[in-house]
Image (tube, rainbow, N blue to C red):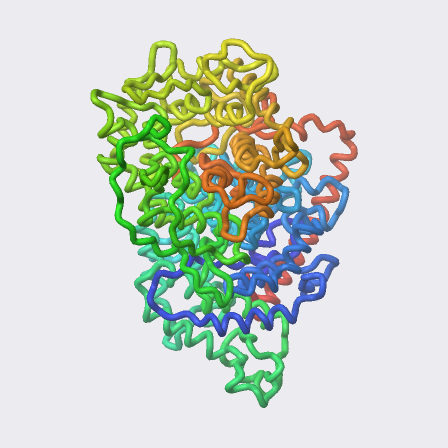
Amino acid sequence: MRRGYLAASAFAVIVTMIATPLSGTATAANDPGAAKVNSRWLATKLKPDGTFDNPSGGSLPDHGLMLDALFAMYAAGEGARAEPIVKFLDDQGHATDYFTWDGLAPGAGYDKIIVGGAVAKTLVAAQVSGRNPRAFDGYDLVAETHAAIMRTGPDKGRVSDYSKDPALADAVSNNANMFGQALGVIGLAVAGENDRIAIDRLLTQQCSEGYFRVLFSSIPTKETGDHVTPDGRKVSTCDEGKPLGLSPTDGDATGLALSAMLAAKKAGAAGLDAPIAKTVSWLKANQTPGGGWGGGVGTEAPNTNSTGLIVQALVDAGGADAAVDKGVRYLKSAQANAAADSGNKLAGELGAIAYDPASYEAARSSGISGLDTWIRASAQASLGLSQIGFYSLAKGEVLPPTTGVPETPAPVTRPHKPAPEPKKSITPKASTGARVSTVAANPAPVTATPAVRLAAYLTNRLVGGDHVEVTEDGKTYVDYDATADVVLALRALDQQPDAVARASQFLLKPEAVQAYAHGAPYEQGEASYAEPLAKLVLVAEFAKSDAVGPLRADLVKLRGADGEFTDTGSFADADRTVERHAWVVLATAADPGPAVELLLSRQCADGTFPKHLDTAECGSGDLAATAAAVTALVARPHTDAAPPTRRPDGWTERRVSAFVSAVGALGVRPTGEGLVTGEGGEVDIALSATVAAARQTAGLDASGTAHSLGKLVQQDGGFAKGAGGETDFPTSSAAAQGVAGRSWLAAADSPLSPAIRLPLTAGTDTPALAAAQSDDRPGWLIWGLAGLAALLLSAAIALVFVLRRFTKKKGVTP
């Protein structure tokens, strides 16, 4: 609704922010046709290079409005029309003009000044457009968003504008607001990396009535602590700001905050039910009789911008069908349409949405005036018609237009067959060499993202919708190990949650646990298998199942004094591999005992790890084993805190050195495309994915692998083991982490998280800070730049206030 609130710093020329909530669950009807024709109208207003001119002037386009249009187009199933925007921002390298100051003063070091809300919005745009958010215009936007969340001080938890260079810190005023805060929460939720302190800070901006304010306002205080500024002020809560007039109601901020809370909840955050319910109640109570909602100060009257945003959030929250229906009717009453406008001044503008119904009526006879306002209104209002929000869009769960493939393919109805007595080549734990049972496939469309297509392929291989079966010599077996691998693969892809839940429930049934981890009914005596138990522990932890405790207790019983886990029973696994040991280390990360030291003692001279744990000395090892070891070494019990860039508490120098050298060894074999080739020069898809996932856990970029593997997806959504071959199920399952560009360890609801992030720094918290402290530029240049920044800051602030006064009257988007 308003320009200027997120224009958070000296060189940010009024950032425009909107938000789109999650996919709807309410029964109120959307209108995809109206949303599509609106997107087509928006596309006609783009310049050939994918930009919109900034109405405030200057050399830079209106990046924020471009992203608003991108969101609207993807929500309407018209994402292809947004491709020029994506190319301009990512391929042509202009995203940094938006979320840093570099675009307005190129080469002056202002790329180190970060606009927090703009980073968050760009992160969500990268996710929505299917680009890799960890390598968008050369930036890891997930990491940059985490970095923009202050960890200490008065702005703790706030998505903030800040300088990576201490010499320029005084030039930055933190004007980041609730739009950026909410988008940061949404983007990190989509990435599976909820940041709890950002969520908690967002909640402080909700007033007791249920609404959210838009600005973080400071008040005088007699409190002490690092949350208080040197001049005795602190950032107030919404209720604390009310007596001073600092907490006016704001429909836009409230709708977007609701979307953020819902996204965080979907990604596993707890404690949000009550604030969500209060927000929904407030929005329902404050809908105008005509069906619309207003924004904040200066835009209190009902308008399509605010209404589109709020309708979308209410649909996702559910329980507000009547309000949603009225809101949709309000939006459509302001849209140019063929039935009513074919013969008037709007005949060439079909699909456009006016700021309010009165503006639409006026334009029917006089035509559109103030095109910029119509574009802003259309981009945000359209979201209330499509009712598809960031969380679903960013995960690729929304299918392209004219495609009727369901989000979760219907499971094939097939009764579970009891497994016959296994031959020596088949154990009750797994049947890795057998053929996967063929079931009717319902692949995702080839226009869907690689992650969506692969997830659909894997889900279609779940017999009865919850397990994998294998057939050999005419006999059918349940492959519990492959089922567990599919669960973790879908977790990494962050797709098909229903299938994940069903397969997890299947694996955790007592009879499945007994068969997979204890060899029933074939073992004649007591038996336990370490790797199956470890995988079941992780599946149970992901699912937040009560089975975790007993499973882990059975696993720990297998650990010897030297840290090695030994199977018991006739079908015990005698193949003492490093990969098997890595699984048990991951499942006992809270208390690994000597298992980590045992792993460290097996590292080869070149930093790799051998394939087998009983290899006492080696010059060079195995890449897959090394990737498994890296993942095991870096894991810690889950925490919302970002991994540090220096040695974590409890880590020995030996562990740090071993970890760094192992990660370095993983970077030797991949090609420039992030792929690993075998001896014959053929791409090894499974190994490429494994290496990429391990590198990502260390904080390194895996986007090259994700991009390259995405090009190798077969027609049915799976992967072939070799060039030109048929789709291979084990290879496809193993490819998931590579396609996702991350390990399952970084997925939503993961019980583990990385304990350290490379590169390491000496005595500093971030690599950027270390670089800044080692800056050898002369002092006169630093102070000169700071002075210039301060001068430009004053001019920009003045411009912001002038534009606020102007644009509040025009009702433009936030």
Q: Position of residue 767 (x, y in %)?
A: 62, 30
**Left or right of 508, for residue 632:** right
- Pick the residue in front: 744 or 574: 574
Q: Please state the horizontal and vertical placement of residue 413, each as a whole percent of the image.
A: 30, 53
Most foreground residue, 60 or 578: 578
Q: Is residue 645 above or below residue 371?
A: above
**Farthest front residue in view:** 473
Q: Residue at x 32, y 29 (%)?
A: 423
Which residue is located at x 42 percent, y 23 percent? 580
Quarter of the figure with the C terminus: bottom right
Horizontal placement of 554 versus 390: left or right?
left
Could you tell me which residue is drawn at 32 percent across and 40 percent down? 476
Residue 680 image position (x, y, % from top left): 64, 31
x and y percent of residue 10 in the render? 66, 49
**Can you tell which quarter of the image residue 658 is in?**
top right
Report the front residue among 572 and 229.
572
Residue at 46% from the left image edge and 79% from the top image edge: 333
Q: Which of these two is toward me, 537 or 670? A: 670
Question: Seen in the image, is 505 located left or right of residue 223?
Answer: left
Please determine whether, in this image, residue 133 is positioned above or below residue 555. Answer: below
The image quadrant of residue 688 is: top right
Residue 20 at least partly seen: yes
